[in-house]
Amino acid sequence: MRSALNFGKTGSKTIGKGFSRLLELPAWCCQGAGGDPIWADDLALAWFLYYAAAQVMDNVQDGDEPDKWWKDQGAGFALSTASGLYFSASLALEALSHNPTTQAKATEVIGDFLRTLIVMGSGQHADLTRAMLSLEQYWQQAETKSGAFFALGCRAGARLATSIDDILAGYTDYGRNFGLLIQITDDLEDVFSPHDSGTPGQKHSFQRSLPVVYALDVLPSDQAARLKKCLRNATQSKEAAQDAILLVDQSGAADYLLVKIEQHKERALEALERAQPRSPAGGWLAKLAQDF
């Protein structure tokens, strides 16, 4: 059986590629829908800044390992930076109203952004109020956060070029499934060793990652209870963390994640076919999904 830990190393390379190219996603969707990618410059900047701000907020709220740039200054410094990113994103989004090329669609696109951010905020709030997630709750949350946000980036980019509902639905579904692929591979990052520990299971984020949620859902009750006990003790006990990893591996979580990656990759490519993107955007967007 493939180890979830080893599979996580494969996922990490994918997320690294995806993150470096995120800024281009709205522009390629705009071009694919028949527009000039330059039209999406302000939109793409706003979308990316919102993404960066949300990442910082999530890391602080979820109690994840601090990034190097704010570890010494503390959570207040990180939250202050996230606030600046949010305001900067709003200014970039507002610029759509002043660009002659995009101003006719600005009100609709800005409204779409705000509604989606509210949905994402509700998903984060629900996450903070639950001690543990069921597998069903995990996917609901992934849909309202990562899925919704990437659907927004693709749909908004395409909206600058077209108002055809079927095409916009195709880009929306492509983005949603792309976002879920991002979420899965991001969770695979949680099985990596933290900087101050050689045991991945000692990371706080490991406890709410998809491999753990899946294991708790499918393991027999006695093993699930043992896993919960290991997770409670993992941050203080390397042995408990190692036992947690073993139980997750025994649950078949790695195979499950492989199946879900292939499933969402296939759905993303099917949605892209429905969107009928023009070249070269179609090839670029297809490759972006296939790279997972």
Image (cartoon, rainbow, N blue to C red):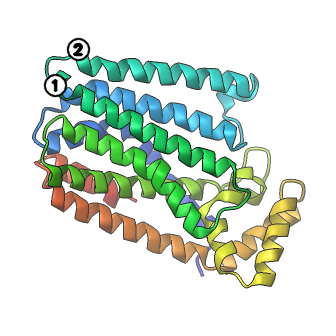
* Residues packed near mark 2 inside 10 Å, few (<14), some (14 to 19) or many (20 plus): few
* Residues packed near mark 1 inside 10 Å, few (<14), some (14 to 19) or many (20 plus): some
Q: Which mark is residue 235?
A: none
In percent of width and height, residue 2 lies at 58, 76
SS at circle 1: helix
**Residue lying farthest to the top in this orientation:** 98
Q: Quadrant of the C terminus?
A: bottom left
The quarter of the picture where residue 63 lies is: top right
Q: Is residue 284 left or right of residue 232?
A: left
Q: Which residue is mark 1?
A: 104
Q: Amino acid at mark 2?
A: His
In percent of width and height, residue 198 lies at 78, 54
Residue 191 visible in rendering: no
Question: Which one is in front in this view, the residue at disc 1 or the one at disc 2?
Answer: 1
Q: Which residue is mark 2?
A: 98
The quarter of the picture where residue 111 lies is: top left
Q: Amino acid at mark 1?
A: Ala
Q: Is residue 48 above or below residue 244?
A: above
In percent of width and height, residue 21 lies at 36, 40
